[in-house]
Structures are given as C-alpha cells and as structure tokens.
Amino acid sequence: MTDQPNLSPDTKAARGLLSAVAVRERSHQLLQAGLEGRLQHFTVNLGRLDACADEVVKTIREAYPSLDIPFHARWRHFSAGGHERWGAVMHGAAWGTAAGMARAAFDLAIVSVLLDAGAGAQWRYEEGRTGETYIRSEGLAVASFDMFVSGAFSSRPEDPFRVDADVLMTLTAEDLAEGFQVSADNPLVGLEGRAALLNRLGRVVATNPDIFGQVDDPRPGGLFDVIAATAEGEHIEATAILEALLTHLGPIWPGRITLGGVDLGDTWRHPLVEAQDATKGLVPFHKLSQWLSYSLIEPLEWAGSSVIEIDGLTGLPEYRNGGLFLDSGVIALKDQTDASRAHAVDSQLVVEWRALTVALLDRIAEPIRAKLGFAAADFPLAKVLEGGTWATGRRLAKEKRGDGSPPLSVISDGTVF
C-alpha cells in the first residue's frame, strides 16, 4: 500500500495486514511454531509431504491428462457438469465493448464468490435447464449463476446481466432462499449471513460512486475500471486485484477486529504471532477476497489485460485444502477428540489449521511441480490449487468419510468458509 504520512501508526500497521504478503508471512510463522512443537492443537510432519504431493499428482493426472490446467477460479464451478454456462452468455449478450462484458463478469463473480461459503451437507440445487442436481460449491455457483442470468440482481429489465447496488441493498434472506431452492427439507447453512453480506455490499457500492460508478450506475463490476487503471502497459499484478478488493470491499465484512479505524475482515488472533507493532498476535487470511482475486483474473484477460505475478497471492485456507493435509497425515491433531467437536471460526484450533494450510500449500507446490516436470513460472499456485490440492482434499474426504465431510467441523456464519 502506498505510504500516507498523516496516518496513525496503528492505521499504517493495520493496512499492512491487508495484503497477501502478510497472510503468507504470518502463516509461515505458525508453521515454524508447529515444526518446533509449540502449537497448542497440531503437530506437523513434513516427512509426509512427499506422499501427499503424490496424491495431488494422481488427482491432476486423472483430471487433466494433458496437464493443461486452468486457474483455480469461480469460472470452473460455472461449468459444472461440462456445461459452459458463461460462454453461452458471452456469445448471446449484446455488450458493446470488452469492458462492458468484463463489468458483467465482475458482477457475477463478486456476488457468486461472496455467496460461496460452506453450504452444509444437506443442501442441493436442481438446475432447471439440465435437470441435474449440484451440491456444495458447484451448487452455489450454478444457483447464483441462475439468479444472475434471470435478472434477479438487476434493476434494469432490459439488461438482466448486471448487479445493481439498489437491488443488493434490499435483497432478503427470503429472496435468496427462493433462488437457492431452500426449504425445511433443503436447508442452506448461513442464509441470513449471506443475505446480510450482499446487503452490505450494496451499501458500500451505492455510497462510493466514485469507485463503483465511474462509467455506469454503481455496481460491483465498477471495480473493473479501478483495477484496469492499475495496468502498466497491458500488465496488471495479481496483488493489485487483492489490494483493490481489500481496500474498497473491506467494509462489507461483519464487524470483527478493527485496528486504527481499519476493519481487518478475515483476520484472527493467535498468541504466537510476532510483530513489532500493534498487529502482534493477528493473523490475516482474506480467504474469500483471495478466492475472488483468482476469479477476476480471467475477466481482466478477456478484456485485453495480462495478469502477472499470480504467485503473489496465497493458497486458500479453506476446509478442502486444510483437509488434504490432515487426511494425508502432514498435520495431526494433538487431541483426537477435537475431530468430533464443532469449532468456532475464531478458535485457536481453526486459526492454526488455516495458517498451516496456507504455509503448507507453499511447501507442497514445489514437489508437485517437480513430479510433473514444470518450473514455477509455468505452473503457478493457482494451477496447483485447481489441479490439484482442492480436488484431492475432496477426494480423500470422500474416501475416508462416506459423506465427504471435512475432517474438522467449523461453525460457519456463511461469510468465511
């Protein structure tokens, strides 16, 4: 972030946590603590990392025999079941410019990712046009896509493929329940929290027209213009995407930890994290914001930019990647009874699990690349995740537990996992 000398020391320190650099550095601090046996809840066995990498390589070779792997992004879920849903919209919509298309793609990705916290094991979504049923992340993606293309987020009947701030502000949990086919027999975890998150998104977008309404009525997709303006020539750094999201969408997150007037979002406390300022003991993850950053790379490239330094972002600390390391024995619970309890997202156990996940994704990327014969430049972390660690975490969960549930249960409010 650019230095602003009139800011208080606490505000400057807090803004330093709004970065992938901070996520990586503090997660590796906790990995080191684990290697030294100082974590309260987990042990770490790096001797199991190579076997874990073998499992990921097995998944990659089965899913992508050509090794032509796309980035980990929401667009993969929009093509669940082999249906290129967004491609059909792109070819059928009457956008006058590439930028107009990119704003619509930003609208869709932002809303869909913000709705992409854990759905719970019971929820299902039946897609009308195919008759197919989807669950978890794919189900949430297809449901949000259907709402988007039906114009549910648009205030302009003649232009359904957009998301308008005034619609988001008045969206109710009942509206989401209808769009997501929620019922007593088909419950969706965190429905109220999801609706409230979109309401806050609407308010932030509506009250900042200088950011979100530079060329159109205020809409989340207005961030396209902000990020496109950071380009050096045709190049945009991936971390610039995350910086824009954390700067301009920070206020949408539920009130958690604030420091120096800065809402730190997906940031939590752990006593072993060291710093020389007021951020001591704080661990940022910014999981949904980074998932969204990965998901905005392709719309920027469709509009003519080239996104670089993608490894500046970190791996995602969510339960599939985290489950991969638990189910493969790279990390282990010190108290096995923790596996049978549900844990609050701010608990020390969950903070340790998530930090270890981020740091170990960095560690496992190298042996995966080596086994596949790629240099880091040709196989960024976004491909490791997609190929990859996320799918292997899901596969191992299914093999070890028939319902595919993660090895640890986290109490979600619909805005973190």
Image (spheres, helix red, strand yellow):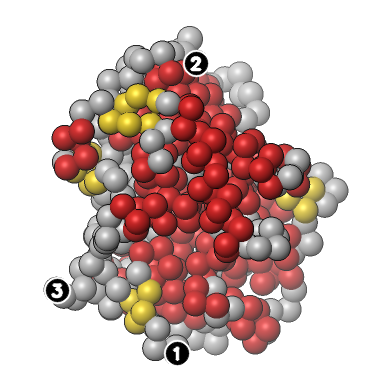
Q: Nearer the viewer, mark 2 or mark 3?
A: 3
Question: Residue 155: percent from the left, percent from the top?
Answer: 46, 77
Q: Find the residue positioned furthest to the top.
A: 276
- Disc 2 to disc 3, how far (Cα)? 50 Å
Q: Is residue 248 above or below residue 403?
A: above
Q: Is residue 21 above or below residue 222?
A: above
Residue 106 showing in the rendered view: no
- Disc 3 to disc 1, how far (Cα)? 24 Å
Q: How many marks?
A: 3
Q: Which residue is mark 3?
A: 184
Q: Identify the amino acid type marked 3.
A: Ala
Observer-nearest of 290 and 6 = 290
- Which quadrant of the rendered structure holds the N terminus? top right
Residue 80 showing in the rendered view: yes
Residue 36: mark in rendering: none
Observer-nearest of 34 and 314 = 34
Residue at x 46%, y 13% (from the top left corner):
275
- Disc 1 to disc 2, how far (Cα)? 55 Å
Q: Which residue is mark 2?
A: 9
Q: Is residue 181 above or below residue 197?
A: below
Quarter of the image where one finds residue 10: top left
Residue 129: mark in rendering: 1
In the image: residue 101, left or right of residue 39 = right
Observer-nearest of 183 and 350 = 350
Which element carries disc 2, helix, strand or loop? helix
Q: Identify the amino acid type marked 2.
A: Pro
Residue at x 26%, y 49% (from the top left corner):
412
Which element carries disc 3, helix, strand or loop? loop
Question: Residue 106: percent from the left, percent from the top?
Answer: 58, 63
Residue at x 58%, y 43% (from the top left corner):
242
Q: Residues within 10 Å of mark 3 (few under 14, many from 20)?
A: few
Q: Identify the amino acid type marked 1.
A: Arg
